[in-house]
Image: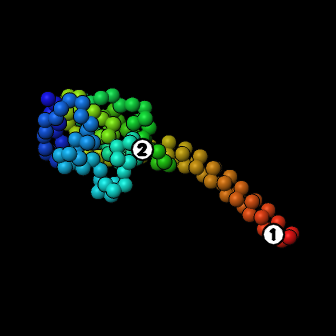
C-alpha cells in the first residue's frame, strides 16, 4: 500500500492505491483548503483551485491534465506560475508513495496577469460605452414622448 507523508503536518498514512488525495485528506482530518476557502470551494470539481498542494518531486501521482493546469494557473484576472509538482488535491490520485506539502504559495505570473487585465479593461470600456449610448438614447426617447 502507498505511504502518504504530509510534510507540514508531520503525519504519515498508509492508503489504498488509486484513492483521491482530496477525499483522503478530508477523511484523515488534514484540510486541503486554507481556512478562508473551507466554506467557499467547488467540492472537488476542478473549478476553484483552492485545494492546491505540492507533491514533492512529482512522484507517486497520476498525470496532471490540461483542465487541472488551467485551473491552477487561475481562472480569473490573476494568473499564477506553477511548477511541475503543483497539483490540485481533488484531481490527484495516490498511485505510489508520496510526500505532500499543503497550501503552497503560488507566485503571480505578472506578464499574463497584465495581459488578462488589459483584455478585461478593453471589454469593460466597450461595455460602459455601450451602456452610456443606450442610456443617452433611452433618455432621449423619454424626452420625445
Ligand atoms: S476543490 Fe476546487 S479545484 Fe479542487
Colour pattern of the rendering:
rainbow
The answer to whether the beta carbon of the residue marked 2 is less than 8 Å from any atom of ligand 1 is yes
Alpha-carbon span between mark 1 and mark 2: 45 Å
70, above or below 131, in the image? above
The answer to whether the beta carbon of the residue marked 1 is less than 8 Å from any atom of ligand 1 is no
Name the residue: 37% across, 38% down.
82
138, above or below 55, in the image? below
Badge 1 vs badge 2, beta-carbon distance below 8 Å = no
The label number, if any, that marks residue 47 in the structure image: 2
- Residue 130 lies in what quarter of the image? bottom right
Q: Position of residue 112 (x, y in %)?
A: 50, 42
Q: Position of residue 128 (x, y in %)?
A: 67, 58
Give the quarter of the figure containing the N terminus.
Answer: top left
Q: Position of residue 111 (x, y in %)?
A: 50, 42
132, above or below 108, in the image? below
Q: Nearer the viewer, residue 6 or 22?
A: 22
Name the residue: 50% across, 49% down.
77
Q: Nearer the viewer, residue 134 or 123?
A: 134
The label number, if any, that marks residue 142 in the structure image: 1
Q: Position of residue 32 (x, y in %)?
A: 27, 47
Q: What secondary structure is marked by label 2? A: loop
Name the residue: 82% across, 66% down.
141
- Residue 94 lies in what quarter of the image? top left
Q: From where the camera sits, is residue 106 visible?
A: no
Around disc 1, counting alpha carbons within 10 Å, would you say few (fewer than 14), some (14 to 19), or many (20 or more)? few
Amino acid at each position: 500500500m502507498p505511504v502518504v507523508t504530509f510534510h507540514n503536518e508531520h503525519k504519515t498514512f498508509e492508503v489504498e492505491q488509486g484513492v483521491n488525495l482530496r477525499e483522503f485528506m478530508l477523511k484523515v482530518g488534514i484540510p486541503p483548503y486554507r481556512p478562508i476557502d473551507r466554506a467557499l470551494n467547488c467540492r472537488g470539481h476542478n473549478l476553484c483551485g483552492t485545494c492546491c498542494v505540492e507533491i514533492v518531486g512529482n512522484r507517486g501521482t497520476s498525470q496532471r491534465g490540461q483542465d487541472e493546469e488551467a485551473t491552477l494557473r487561475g481562472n480569473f484576472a490573476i494568473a499564477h506560475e506553477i511548477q511541475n509538482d503543483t497539483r490540485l488535491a481533488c484531481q490527484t490520485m495516490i498511485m505510489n508513495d508520496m510526500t505532500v506539502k499543503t497550501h503552497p504559495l503560488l507566485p503571480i505570473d505578472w506578464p499574463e496577469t497584465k495581459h488578462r487585465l488589459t483584455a478585461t479593461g478593453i471589454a469593460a470600456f466597450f461595455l460602459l460605452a455601450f451602456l452610456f449610448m443606450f442610456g443617452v438614447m433611452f433618455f432621449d426617447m423619454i424626452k420625445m414622448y
